[in-house]
Amino acid sequence: MTHARGDVDAVASSIGMTFMLKALGAKNITILFPEGVTLEARKLISYVDIADANILFVKKQDTCYSRMLTDSTCIVLDTADSNQLRAVQDGISLCRYVVVVDHHAHGDMARRANLVLIDKNSSSTSELILELLRTLNGTLSYNSTVLECLLAGVLSDSRRFLHNVSPRTFELVSWALTKGAKYSKALELLRTEVPPSARIAKLKCLARACIMKIDTLYLCISHVGAYEADCANSLIALGCDAAFVFSEDKSAKAVRLVFRSNTEFLNKFGSVYESVIRSILKELGGSAGGHEQAGGALLKIRKVEEGVHVLISVLKKALGTELVPLKEHRVCGDNTW
């Protein structure tokens, strides 16, 4: 199982883990995706054939998964905190054994697990699965489509090798290519047609953004109804050094916060996750997961405005400076033309 709304890395590592378990003789494998997967990740599921493995998209009100988890070995991938499991969170207590494979900072899943493989210096959980497969070299017959999915997971979470990569990352990519994976196929898996709703969300995110200058760096805060991760990535691509995007999650009766930052911001102010997100959680409650430069939180509040207020207060303390929004004249003003 993965975190809710599994992204490319979560889905890729699930595919890789399933292939490895099947090759080692495991049976009755079920992959649980709480609340489905992201648009980008759907392509991976249709690309690879996971024969004899059940794939179950668990909705919040579903209870059919409980029988599957009872007395089973549950492998939790790409998930630091049990709150991120959302629809299947309560089912963890039903498992006989819990194994966690992840690359995020430790959350409560590490404490609840019987066996843990966590490396926060890894680019992705997919990289850790590649390392496990390489360790079994000579034991398995490798499937090129599975390796291509794992390469896509590495590429996605490292932002095309820009974030948290190490010599091992490139060694494992090279190893996967020698085993038949095609780099061009992995890149193709990451190409998805952007739906109109995502384009609109990005445009609204930009229109609503509050931009603040701190020395030579720019910090951006915005809110949208959906696609908050895509919006945060877009703000970084447009020139923000750090981006915080809020959205109201009515089904969870909470507010989501996604953050991204670049290397310049990290070098000057340190880890956003450690200095900002943890402080917000202490004040508002909730759960979070992520790295120094990317991640998200589910806050126990109902209104975005409350989250923005606390975020700005925490940022001022963490950065040691006042935050002054840039004020620019809007071409259209507030008029209806």
Image (spheres, helix red, strand yellow):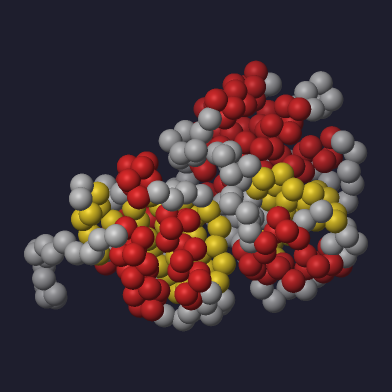
User: For this rendering, which residue is in front, 70 or 332?
Assistant: 70
Q: Residue at x 43, y 35 (%)?
A: 162
Image coordinates of residue 89 in percent, x first then y, are 71, 68
Image coordinates of residue 311 in percent, x first then y, are 37, 68
**The furthest residue to the top:** 178
Quarter of the figure that contains the N terminus: bottom right
Left or right of 159, for residue 9: right
For residue 149, say whether it is visible. no
User: For this rendering, which residue is in front, 18 or 282?
Assistant: 282
Left or right of 74, for residue 279: left
Q: Residue at x 69, y 37 (%)?
A: 129
For residue 274, say whether it is visible. yes
Left or right of 97, for residue 284: left
Image coordinates of residue 224 in percent, x first then y, are 37, 68
Quarter of the figure that contains the C terminus: bottom left
Q: Residue at x 41, y 80 (%)?
A: 303
Name the image quarter holding residue 326: bottom left
Q: Residue at x 82, y 41 (%)?
A: 21
